[in-house]
Image (cartoon, rainbow, N blue to C red):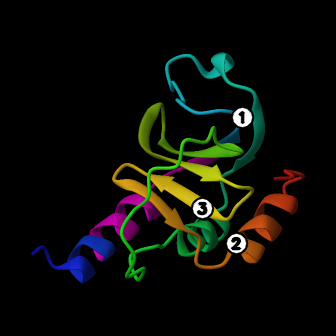
Amino acid sequence: MPDMNTHRIRERNRLLGVDEVVVFEGAGYDPQSRRSVDRLATERDPREISALVDLLDVWDCICEPMQWMEWPTCSLAFLTGRELVAEFELLSGAGWIRRPDGDYPATDPDSLERWLAARSVTV
């Protein structure tokens, strides 16, 4: 079984190395065609990106990932220049986070909603 703590540290470092986070409607961010998505907010402050990364951390979840048949409320694209580093979709408001390996309950959906609301994004 892989060491989850090592994976968690790698994931966190990968996300903290980005230049920008874009909050957008729908899913499937294409960094080569930035006009193809409806941007709701953009964040470039490293401290705010770090706070968001903490809110998306679901590695402590002891649950099995779910596969909800739900369209995301909005999505978060983590970018370095025009390179998409990661995309996370928010489901059921901000109650669930869709990661590449499945859907996980958000550890602190209220704080995640406040982070979004501070950027005028309502979920």
Q: Residue at x 16, y 79 (%)?
A: 3
**Position of 100 compared to 58: left or right?**
left
Q: Which residues are magenta?
A: 9-21
Q: Residue at x 70, y 61 (%)?
A: 94
> The residue under label 1 is which amino acid type?
Glu
According to the image, label 3 marks what residue? 96
According to the image, label 1 marks what residue? 25
**Position of 63 compared to 123: left or right?**
left
Percent from the top left, x then y, of residue 32?
49, 19
- Sequence order check: which comes first, mark 2 or mark 1? 1
Residue 22 in view in this figure: no
- Sequence order check: which comes first, mark 3 or mark 1? 1
Circle nearer the viewer, 3 or 1: 3
Residue situated furthest left in the rendering: 1
Q: Residue at x 48, y 36 (%)?
A: 81
**Position of 40 compared to 70: left or right?**
right
Which mark identifies residue 109? 2
Q: CA gap, disc 2 to disc 1?
A: 18 Å
Mark 1: which secondary structure? loop
Percent from the top left, x then y, of residue 72?
64, 42
User: 114 above or below 108?
Assistant: above
Q: Nearer the viewer, residue 33 or 17?
A: 33
Q: CA gap, disc 3 to disc 2?
A: 8 Å
Q: Main secondary structure of the magenta part?
A: helix
